[in-house]
Image (cartoon, rainbow, N blue to C red):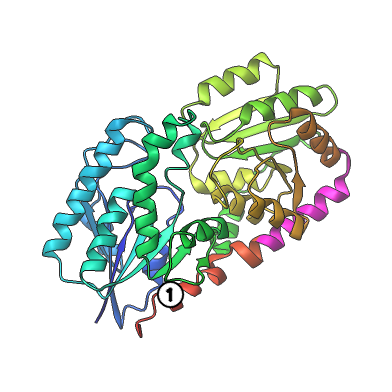
Amino acid sequence: MFDILIIAHFTQIPGEAGNGRFHYIAEKVDKINAAVEIVTTSFSHRTKCQRRVTDEQLNRLSYKLTMLYEPGYRKNVSFKRFYSHYIMGKSLKKYLKKRKKPDVIYCAVPSLDVAKVAAQYARQNNIRFIIDVQDLWPEAFKMVFNVPIISDIIFFPMRCQANYIYGTADEIVAVSQTYVDRALRANKKCKKGNSVFLGTELNYFDGLAKENKLRHKSKDEIWFVYIGTLGHSYDLSCVIDALALVKDKYNIKFIVMGDGPLKCKIEKYAKECGVYADFMGRLDYGKMVGILTSCDIAVNPISHGAAQSIINKHGDYAAAGLPVLNTQECPEYRNLLLEYNAGLNCDNNNAVDLAEKLMQLCEDIDLRSIMGQNSRRLAEERFDRGNTYLIFREVLQMEH
């Protein structure tokens, strides 16, 4: 029996909301010829609590789930978090010593502490090592703490860790080509990698949309929507400034579905600017899909210098068939919108430009409809897991 070990520090477990990339991969593996185990943490990054899973939930899985001890932390950017990850790395090292050697290790990056332990173990034991880059560290942390020279010095050890992990990989997978290219720059063995967007399973998404379809929506309102984290990487203040410029011309309702450290601050700012907004918090995915598919225009307001490339909300916006107003600087996503004519790219941190593009879509219903249809086509061709995730059969093939 071929033994596949998936190590994913931040993956979801049964009962938790989220994208579930590694659960999806594990479920799709041919269980007749392979055994799969997912190793993750006992601590939930989202709720900041120790996790609980029942025997009934575990028994429903077609793979083995192992949770290793991690003490946890309260703030996402803190020394306590780095210490917590260090302990999780120690827990993994201890576990690998007593576990039989797998045939392949498929490892999410980040966290770096965990991925480095996996990389060292794979190298020492001549085990095929595949990485799946979900985010760029330390680049993402520099969004919150970016002091010239000082930040570079502080994050230098993390950069070295990341380069070691990337360089050790026998094969590179990532959630975007941008991340693939970053890993390849540190890897001398791999000539190319596989970019597989996080995506969503469209049949599942469409089923939820049908089940949760809204029965009532005012016809004279244009629903302008943002889903995701309310944090430093997302320039929602610029969105509110843009809405303040057009609030007397159009009946626009700004719908925000998500939570984060800046929620209260952004909500307060919207009220001060007199912007018609509904901050709904973090919703059940099905309910979110029902509201999202009733919206008219989506916004992707990534802050200047952010490390994000192709992220969850891109797939959900496309699945919902929404035209996107995009301020994200990442060339990969900007080019994707241009290629499919699925939205309008805006200048970063420029409320006037964003307001002008928003007015363009408000006034031109035909353009809005065409871009919405193109957005859905983008989902079907590039974000549908039913098609895009077939590559994992090749990546994890047992003939290696």
Q: Which residue is mark 1?
A: 395
Q: Would you say residue 10 is visible in this rendering?
A: no
Position of 235 with respect to 49 (left or right) is right
**For residue 246, which quarter of the picture?**
top right
Query: Does residue 374 show up magenta in the picture?
Result: yes
- Outermost bottom residue: 399
Q: Which residues are magenta?
A: 363-378
**Residue at 54% of width from left, 40% of height from top?**
228
Q: Position of residue 10 (x, y in %)?
A: 36, 49
- Outermost top residue: 272
Q: Position of residue 122 (x, y in %)?
A: 26, 67
Q: Position of residue 79 (x, y in %)?
A: 30, 31
Question: Is residue 18 positioned above or below 274 on the image?
Answer: below
Decide which of 169, 100 is in the foreground and name it: 169
Query: Does residue 153 show up magenta in the picture?
Result: no
**Residue at 51% of width from left, 37% of height from top?**
229
**Residue at 17% of width from left, 61% of height from top?**
96
Decide which of 246, 220 is in the foreground and name it: 246
Decide which of 131, 56 is in the foreground and name it: 131
Decide which of 252, 360 is in the foreground and name it: 360
